[in-house]
Amino acid sequence: MQQKIKKIGVMTSGGDAPGMNAAIRSVVRTCAFHNIECYGIYRGYEGMIEGDFVKMNARSVKGIINKGGTVLKTARSKAFRTKAGRAKAFEKLKSEGIDAYVVIGGDGSFTGAMVFNEEYNFPVIGIPGTIDNDIYGTTHTLGYDTTLNTVVDAIDKIRDTASSHNRLFFIEVMGRDVGHIALNTGVGAGAEEILIPEEDLGLDRLLESLRRSKQSGKSSSIVVVAEGDKIGKNVFELADYVEENMTEYEVRVSVLGHMQRGGSPSCFDRVLASRMGVKAVESLLEGKSNYMVGLKNDVMDLTPLNKAIKGRSKINMELIRVSDIMTV
Amino acid sequence: MQQKIKKIGVMTSGGDAPGMNAAIRSVVRTCAFHNIECYGIYRGYEGMIEGDFVKMNARSVKGIINKGGTVLKTARSKAFRTKAGRAKAFEKLKSEGIDAYVVIGGDGSFTGAMVFNEEYNFPVIGIPGTIDNDIYGTTHTLGYDTTLNTVVDAIDKIRDTASSHNRLFFIEVMGRDVGHIALNTGVGAGAEEILIPEEDLGLDRLLESLRRSKQSGKSSSIVVVAEGDKIGKNVFELADYVEENMTEYEVRVSVLGHMQRGGSPSCFDRVLASRMGVKAVESLLEGKSNYMVGLKNDVMDLTPLNKAIKGRSKINMELIRVSDIMTV
Amino acid sequence: MQQKIKKIGVMTSGGDAPGMNAAIRSVVRTCAFHNIECYGIYRGYEGMIEGDFVKMNARSVKGIINKGGTVLKTARSKAFRTKAGRAKAFEKLKSEGIDAYVVIGGDGSFTGAMVFNEEYNFPVIGIPGTIDNDIYGTTHTLGYDTTLNTVVDAIDKIRDTASSHNRLFFIEVMGRDVGHIALNTGVGAGAEEILIPEEDLGLDRLLESLRRSKQSGKSSSIVVVAEGDKIGKNVFELADYVEENMTEYEVRVSVLGHMQRGGSPSCFDRVLASRMGVKAVESLLEGKSNYMVGLKNDVMDLTPLNKAIKGRSKINMELIRVSDIMTV
Amino acid sequence: MQQKIKKIGVMTSGGDAPGMNAAIRSVVRTCAFHNIECYGIYRGYEGMIEGDFVKMNARSVKGIINKGGTVLKTARSKAFRTKAGRAKAFEKLKSEGIDAYVVIGGDGSFTGAMVFNEEYNFPVIGIPGTIDNDIYGTTHTLGYDTTLNTVVDAIDKIRDTASSHNRLFFIEVMGRDVGHIALNTGVGAGAEEILIPEEDLGLDRLLESLRRSKQSGKSSSIVVVAEGDKIGKNVFELADYVEENMTEYEVRVSVLGHMQRGGSPSCFDRVLASRMGVKAVESLLEGKSNYMVGLKNDVMDLTPLNKAIKGRSKINMELIRVSDIMTV
């Protein structure tokens, strides 16, 4: 039987995402609200192994709700993939008296949490923090909404120059396995074509679509490309291919890169983070473990970690149709 | 029996909201996609009465997806509340051959649409465009998400000066009947207290809460106040009252005002607008009328206009609790 | 003869302004560069009197260059206006071993510095930090450029709604004694009329100008009003007056308020702050005192504090003419 | 002797820059103010050769002061480099009755203007519109200030992720021949090192500087690299080199790319554009030609086009020193 939890750890792990600080703040304050001690664990599982902990109270997290990145830092830990590493981590947690933790991260981080839980029955709740929105069990991961706004803002700027010069731009956005960012920002920025991992448009159809766009009177065009698209060429090769096959356009490439991860979180992400932190801590206090908190139909929900990892976050097929109609 | 629709009108009505242009664009392009003629109606029902129409095609709406306000302008029409006004409007629509329309607006605009439909059986679909999120039948109205970001951005700026001076700020945000904006931005900006129309906190509890906040070590505080809060004093009187009763704080007031309505729509609002425009036009083409399109569980949905108007968009009580915990 | 300086204090005083943190950072790091100890003084002269000091090194100011407000807090001190208060301040500085200081603030702060210097011959250099740009001896005060951008961004948003509704907006911006903010943002946001303290346009000419604007085909209008304008009515009375006398317009008022002070500083303000901090510290080290650093013809310059206070920062008359031409 | 000017053309040429629309607006309205006809020339010299002109009046330029890009589009014209091309252009201008023009662009555009003026004695005034600030005769080119803000905003975002992961980032910014953007944004964003075309830091000193930075306790670092830096490697090779030679850091690269050109212009650029447009048109009306308008000591000034082209816009050496001190 589970003992009463007295000290909760909180950490961020994997790639950083806007809203992680807001989630840390929420975890810390919910602990304070319930008179539970709270410890920050630096640099994810790395810091857990090294015992790099800091005691936090309600005031330690002041002024961070609107900051990008993570004050607890984050890392990907190779050591935690080894039995020896996890054994060390357990020792460190025990010696500090931490008896449960909240991990904010993506599926790599959750996999680590599950393995650790199997071995040591160590209570854990996950908060999905990743800009990619690629986690099953929540309609929105933390940071995703902010990234959408960062990306459309950048594409809006590029469109200024695209339309001034009558150019065709290929813009690569994040999303190795799923096309959520590309699909939504493509629709949101009025892109002529959107290339995502879930669909293989094919080079012929891409050329055809761009030609139709040109004929319909458009002088400039934007193609949004997810990192992980299936078209078989990287974005620079793709641009070269199109320029060779369509002399009508002057083609340019822009890879938005790491700025997509940063910035002050949107109101949505700050609120979501606040809700998730409360739910995570209170779930631990209710004796639950091995779950991920998520947003479903605007309600806080729990999904077993193994389902969250194995499940698939599917893109909205309706949006693909909307995109087609918008580029009439 | 309904005849086949050949010409669809589109207009914006009531207060403007970010995303209205994206919705106009979507309506126009969906018409083009289905080879239906589309007419813009200027200044809402005013322009309908005056026959102030403009033929639009896919290219007419280029470059507006990211613009605030509405290119079709908007107005509140007294004339349309009279039988004579509506008769004129019907004549104008008929003489132009418009046989259905999409109205983008709030409940005032939908009430007009229903009355008009009763009298002339004129097909109409509504798109909820208002920053207040006060419409039943959709989890999000168009413009609401953008306004949340505009407001937290403004509060973040005010917090810079509040915390530099150890001040208490009362910040009035929009929301006459519902507290969605205040509640969400209050949580998102880390406000110490949030005053909304749905709850009467009472002056005593407000003072108590601010005192507790001071004692807990906070040197500055933000109170977010919805326009329509129930505390019985306007925001300036409220600030005076608190300053008289709490000498610990230097108190300031900021009324965010009309800037909350403007600005480039967020990615979410642009995508929502695009989806709603498609759904609105295709619903008309399927012979439906007197419905509002809405977002429910991330799916496009229809709600009868009379239910949308009479229903109540409720605030999320969970968020009030989250707010309380966050200000521990 | 001046002794070698070993410990320098730095503080912010008066109203906060974006860029103050960047200036603090620069002062602290320039001290570190020259192997001088540096102490932060909290809450301006208040903290000086209370001996509220903190030792700072190069790492203490990391991550603040892009933050609004001031990490050292700021205040207006009544106690420092008394002989007794200044005596206490001197004691506190002496006992800490601080032998010179940099004050970042406006003319009130500089007046305090001069009086203190007369009484105790205490070395001081001023950095002009105020959004109003009302200090003689520098073409730009710290924070001014950022505020211009914050204000035009807000007016752009208001214009979205103004032009959607064909409204006339009176927008009050900061500037009690000088019209720099109003004049520059008025030109920058394309205002139809700009009311500043330096000019009394008169109500008749205002009405005439708005009528001409209406006749020239403009459907909406923005009037930017400096807090300290000379037209003899506050902005709400002014709006009422115009609405009574011009039935053509629906009139609205927006007071931008405290958000004008906040936000992340512009690149210009960050660079200016960095330059000013270096110049301030190195001037002290060269044995100079009682000067303000300033920007003149893009070069760092020194102005005696008494001239900075008594001098007048004049608005650019060319800009008034440009504004008139732009509203043709 | 010069005849009285009755029709003025205005065009944008070369790379686009924020503020070009504000300058077009100013030229058009200054013409209207002086009762001179004004024609927009599309796509720079390309449109001049093709006679792609549009008559503009004060209302044609409404709502563009805050838009990025250029409504007149821009291009680089090969045809205009030929005698035949210029002959055609002259014919087109003559047949439309245009007797002078304002060209908004960079030194390529000004070179074209000079050659054309030599051959046809065709009155022209240049407005320096380029984000690079690489033109002699003005302290600021149009668009430069906006780009600085766009770049520091992007670097701030990247720093969020850099400091969350303890990474070293190489960020490439625009600036082929001059380092203004890199130097100012490097200081403004608190970069540890700045690589510009004007200085060859050398790989050894770069490594040494990064090592010192690491030893001083910094866990993450940003190096800003101008496109045209002299270090002899492109930014990706540079990152590889550093990663091989400094195992302490995980290294990442971000090329900011075309988004640096877009976006709504800053208040400074809008005001500068407005002033430059007035000065350009009024200079033509005073019979002047072959000059560029510029900002010197905050006053509008004229520089002969040949001096503007041949002269060198020098970086501020003081800033390099400031940057060194800031990274202590």
Image (tube, coloured by chain):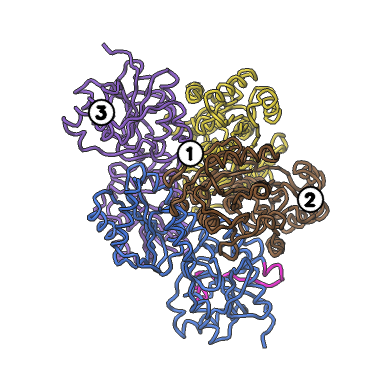
Chain colours: A yellow, B purple, C blue, D brown
- Considering only vertical position in the picture, is C223 above or below C296? above
- Quadrant of the image occupied by residue C78: bottom left
- Considering only vertical position in the picture, is B301 above or below C223? above
Disc on res. D230: 2
Q: Residue under mark 2: which chain is it in?
A: D
* SS of the residue under disc 1: helix
Q: Report the magenta residues as a range.
A: C30-50
From the top left corner, tell me how far across and down residue C240 is, in percent. Answer: 25, 57
From the top left corner, tell me how far across and down residue A20 is, in percent. Answer: 55, 43
The residue lying at 65 percent from left, 24 percent from top is A246
From the top left corner, tell me how far across and down residue B140 is, in percent. Answer: 38, 34
The residue lying at 63 percent from left, 25 percent from top is A229
Disc on res. B113: 3
Task: Tell me whether the residue at label 1 lies in contact with that at label 2, contact meaning CB atoms closer than 8 angstroms.
Answer: no
From the top left corner, tell me how far across and down residue C303 is, in percent. Answer: 58, 77
Q: Which residue is mark 1?
A: A276
Q: State whether discs 2 and 3 lie on one chain.
A: no
Mark 1 against mark 2, which lies toward the viewer? 2
- Considering only vertical position in the picture, is D38 above or below C245? above
Q: Residue under mark 1: which chain is it in?
A: A
Q: Residue furthest front?
A: D1
